[in-house]
Image: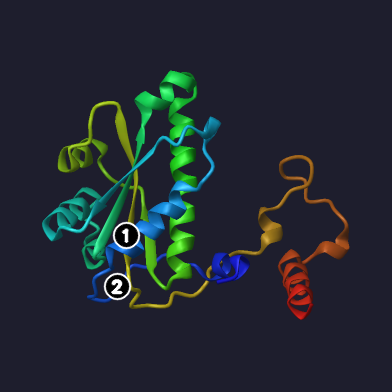
Amino acid sequence: METSKCIKERRSINNYLDKDVPLRLILELLDAAHQAPSSGNIQNWRFIIVKNKKTREEIAECCLSQTWMCQAPVHIVICSDREHISSFYEKHKNTYSIQNCAMAAQNLMLKAHSIKLGTCFVAGFSKMTMKRILEIKEGSEPEGIITVGYPAEKPTSKRGLLENYTFFETYSNRRADKSLWPLNKKIKDLFSKFKKK
């Protein structure tokens, strides 16, 4: 799937078909996640594949009782080895840990969409409980859970106008060449020109 199309079409999926995801596809997702950039190429991410139904139910309960998560046949828990990263970046270990794992998560979710799998990133959970459920070692922190499965829904886009989120040179400065607006339309026009070539 073409990159721009994949980025624009990917949506968070909360409803999944009752269908298993083969391990080879899960490993493809993890390979994509592992290709993400990281601070100083530290690669502090660690991935836990969870397919056990009871464990997935415990994870969903730990995630503020988000029971819809149980529909997904796979949960991938992304952890950060903070002990490893702190030996290089003690002062910024928390920030870099989260940023690096977030980039890996985005790679994973885009790869999933490109092979017709649905995902949803979940970050609201009790870290202490998650560590207990998954026996996460001291010095490592769970950063997020990605539900994975075959989607049973097609959510629509709810994006605001790009110009409402774009500034020039300084925060809040929207003054720019007026011919740029609306940005969403200009970007669509640009993509259509590329497709014709």
Question: What's the image's color scheme?
Answer: rainbow
Residue drawn at x 15%, y 52% is: 58
Question: How many numbered discs?
Answer: 2
Q: The disc labelled 1 sits on which kind of residue?
A: Thr
Horizontal arrangement in the rendering, residue 161 relative to residue 87 (left or right): right
Q: Residue at x 44, y 56 (%)?
A: 108
Classed neighbour count for the residue bearing mark 2: other residues with Cα under 10 Å, few (<14), some (14–19), many (≥20): many
The residue that label 2 is drawn on is 16
Q: Is residue 57 left or right of residue 138?
A: left
Q: Residue furthest front?
A: 24
Judge whether 36 appears above or below 135 on screen. Answer: below
Q: Secondary structure at mark 2?
A: loop
Residue 147 numbered tag: 1
Q: Are marks 2 and 1 in contact (CB under 8 Å)?
A: yes
What residue is drawn where x is 71% and y is 52%? Answer: 166
Q: Position of residue 92 (x, y in %)?
A: 49, 24
In the rendered image, the quadrant that contains the C terminus is bottom right
Q: Position of residue 15 (x, y in %)?
A: 31, 72
